[in-house]
Amino acid sequence: MKVNIRYRRPWLYPRQRAAIFSPARYAVIEASTKSGKTVGCMTWLLEEALRGRAGMNYWWVAPVYLQARIAFRRMQRLHFTLGGSGGAGSLFGINRSALTITLPNGAVLWFKSAEKPDNLYGEDVFAAVLDEASRMREDSWHAVRTTLTATRGPVRIIGNVKGKKNWAYLLARKAEAGEPGMSYAKLTAYDAVAAIKPNGRSVLAAAEVADAKRVLPPRVFAELYEAVASDDGGNPFGDVRAHVRPLSALPTVWWGIDLGKAQDYTVLIGLDENGQVTAVHRWQRPWIDTKRWILAAVADRPTLVDSTGLGDPIVEDLHAVRANIEGYTFTLSSKQRLMEGLASAIQENLLWYPEGVVLNELDLFEYEYVRSGVRYSAPQGMHDDCVCALALAQECRRTRRYAPVRLWGGPLSDDEDSAA
């Protein structure tokens, strides 16, 4: 029997709608409490299921059973958005013990707990929402991801931020850095205050946010209402957000380059005479293209390049063309010296960099004491290419003086120097 369904999407404010209805397969949304992330993702999951057919599964996964049941009940209240000849309520098959809602097209919405990751394996799922992901075990995310493999289904990963040492925070940084197939958004309490509903009221009252700021500890308020994670680990650079500036318009004087091809990125970072970043280039390309792009970018400026491992022959080729391009080999001790120099430059207000992937990597960077010294690195699964490139640029600035030279040898004339 053919059933006509009339659907009316609940009102969503623009930033909420853009964050959740992204075309990306993986949308990661760090959001404050009461910013609309839950109702927005319920709407998204319902609409995904309405495009399905009999036997297709759509999951809402929460950290514990109680939270899954709350979402199930809230989804039931959304039934008014559907209408049909038999009345809105008759279009649903609701199983309160199994926490499932069967739509008229036969697609099934499931509300599941992530408490036992092993229970999440096995199904084919066509779309999923992971609610309060920062409070969910990483094994549960791995399990849900396997259920989306055969269907290539999309997923929305939402929740408050809760520190920096959890998989959801690290995945958000990947999405924010522009990993393929991912999108990132942040929804704060202030976004909800600024959003005006059709009845003329704000989604969230400004007075309520002000009161929460007054009574809550700053760290707690920042996480729950501003979606700013607290620093719960050892970062060697201090307050990295205090050194954010836009890209400098002055000429680049020094370059630092970290090489990568497949898993990692090649990153070029330039600094001006004041220690402010002038350019950030980041790519994954074949070595022949990488060498050509580096030569075009750095010209005759002093340049330090990571020459560790596979980078050694690349740096030899570059140095053969441009004597101003030199290698820097990473060992435990040399990387420690390099990172301590970067930390010193930041803490002494000698270095400035833009928001985006550079800031994100600095924010996540860690150190730990080992028997042979101090080990500096990004968290497992994350990149530190920008940190290394910035550290190399700062080391180049500290140790190399810029004197214009002819690109193929010899000093530049005054006219050539001006043209360059």
Image: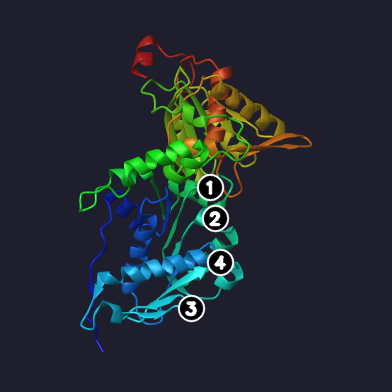
Q: Which residue is mark 3?
A: 98
Q: Residues within 10 Å of mark 4 (few under 14, many from 20)?
A: some
Q: Residues within 10 Å of mark 2 (few under 14, many from 20)?
A: some
Give the spatial CA distance, label 4 vs label 2: 16 Å
Quadrant location of the N terminus? bottom left
Q: Residue at x 48, y 16 (%)?
A: 410
Q: Residue at x 44, y 34 (%)?
A: 280
Q: Residues within 10 Å of mark 1 (few under 14, many from 20)?
A: many
As shown in the figure, which amino acid type bears the numbered disc 3? Ala
Percent coordinates x, y for residue 284 in the rendering: 48, 46
Q: Which residue is mark 1?
A: 162
Q: Are marks 2 and 1 in contact (CB under 8 Å)?
A: yes
Q: Which residue is mark 2?
A: 135
Percent coordinates x, y for residue 132 in the rendering: 49, 56
Nearer-N-terminus badge (2/3) = 3
Left or right placement of residue 420 versus residue 405 in this view: left
